Image (cartoon, rainbow, N blue to C red):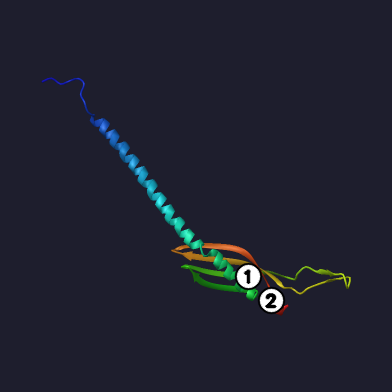
Amino acid sequence: MSRSSSARGFTLIEVLIAATILFASITIVSDAYRTSMQSTRRAETVIRMLTPLPMIVSKIQSTLRSDPIERATGEGELLGVRYVYSAEGKLFEPPPRRFDPDQAEFTAYAPRYRLYDVRLQLAFAMQKREFVYQELAWLPAARR
């Protein structure tokens, strides 16, 4: 029997090259999938942490406006997110002077408005975020 010069099939080198390309593409795809899953989990954690943020800020705002003292601190938990805040009054100013045409003079007011620097820390699922913002509060009419 004689061997045909036109052999059919793949050589060992061709099979090894094809297998290398296949395994490299599988590795790249699985790494991209793993990275996207990790990113999705991180994004989900951030979303769950930031969802109650407007409610927490509103609660801090109402606390400061109900009793605008020089310094205020507090903590709590809302929707599984722990928060701690501290507010420090930076300015305590009166309203602008107003001209009274009946008396032909400006009327000055006592200090009533307080501007706070608020530092808010959120913690959820071993992640922490810190926010710094300013909040305005004013003395109630009875304490003027």
- Examine the image and state in which quarter residue 67 appears: bottom right
Q: Residue at x 61, y 72 (%)?
A: 62
Residue 88 is labelled as 1
Q: Element under label 1?
A: strand
Q: Position of residue 84 (x, y in %)?
A: 53, 69
Q: Residue at x 33, y 42 (%)?
A: 26
Disc 1 from disc 2: Cα separation: 19 Å
Disc 2: which residue: 140
Residue 131 is labelled as none
The residue nearer to you, when weighing 105 against 34, is 105
Please name the amino acid that badge 2 sits on.
Pro
Q: Position of residue 82 (x, y in %)?
A: 49, 68
Q: Position of residue 135 (x, y in %)?
A: 64, 66
Residue 116 horizontal side relative to residue 74, left or right: right
Please name the amino acid that badge 1 sits on.
Glu
Residue 59 horizontal side relative to residue 96, left or right: left
Q: Element under label 2?
A: loop
Frontmost of labels 1 and 2 is 2
- Examine the image and state in which quarter residue 54 appears: bottom right
Q: Quadrant of the C terminus?
A: bottom right
Q: Position of residue 11 (x, y in %)?
A: 23, 29
- Examine the image and state in which quarter residue 100 appears: bottom right
The residue nearer to you, when weighing 61 against 128, is 61
Is residue 13 positioned above or below 95 on the image? above
Q: Residues within 10 Å of mark 1 (few under 14, many from 20)?
A: some
